[in-house]
Image: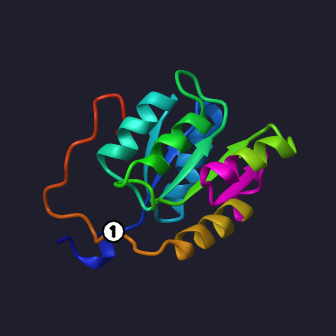
Amino acid sequence: MPPPETWAPQIFVAEDDRGVLDLLRTRLTVAGYQVGYARDGRDALQGITARPPHAVLLDVNLPELDGFGVLKALKANTTTARVPVMMMTARQRAEDVRTAIALGANDYLAKPFRDEVLLLRLTRLLRARVTLPSPPDDVAPSPPDDVVLL
């Protein structure tokens, strides 16, 4: 097990917009999180399932498989069902919020958002998690080739 000072919660970001993704990766890394990411729903589902993170930030509008499809698959899988998920979208329709919550999302964040709001809600999301995974072993499984972990 690595020393405690090198261990940080892992957050997986599924976001297709390169600018938003870069902003999220930078902000989360500066805040002390380890960040994995994918730019489409299928790669996100594969990456999250291969190495379940402490929390997921999931865009609704993703290519290949939309965020609702990813969320539904995560909640149906016993390995990932307890991973808290915050949906993110520029769409602010009440129907989308209801759908996300009905599928098991723990939070819903409308874009654009302020960094401090994102970080506060992410902290709340992590606290709400029933059990956090243990710090990674010395040898962690490799993520799929399409998924990049920082």
Q: Who's the residue at 59% across and 30% down the image?
A: 66
Of the residues shown, which amino acid type is indicated by label 1? Pro
Q: Who's the residue at 40% across and 74% down the image?
A: 131
Q: Is residue 140 visible?
A: yes
> Quick check: 149 left or right of 112?
left
Count up the numbered dots.
Answer: 1
> Quick check: 37 left or right of 97?
left
Which residues lie in the magenta part?
A: 100-116
Packing grade of label 1 (10 A; few <14, some 14-19, many >=20) is: few
Q: Who's the residue at 60% across and 64% down the image?
A: 122
Q: Position of residue 20 (x, y in %)?
A: 65, 38
Q: How is the image coloured?
A: rainbow
Q: Position of residue 130 (x, y in %)?
A: 46, 75
Q: Secondary structure at mark 1?
A: loop
Please check the rendered image and state whether residue 108 is part of the magenta-colored stretch, yes or no: yes
Depth check, front residue: 16 or 84: 84
> Quick check: 112 left or right of 56?
right
Q: Is residue 149 visible?
A: no
Which corner quadrant holds the N terminus?
bottom left
Residue for badge 1: 133
Please check the rendered image and state whether residue 142 is part of the magenta-colored stretch, yes or no: no
Depth check, front residue: 85 or 39: 85
Q: Position of residue 67 (x, y in %)?
A: 60, 37
> Quick check: 50 left or right of 97?
left
Q: Position of residue 127 (x, y in %)?
A: 54, 76
On screen, 24 above or below 114? above
Residue extending furthest left?
139
Dividing the picture into quadrants, the one containing residue 107 is: bottom right
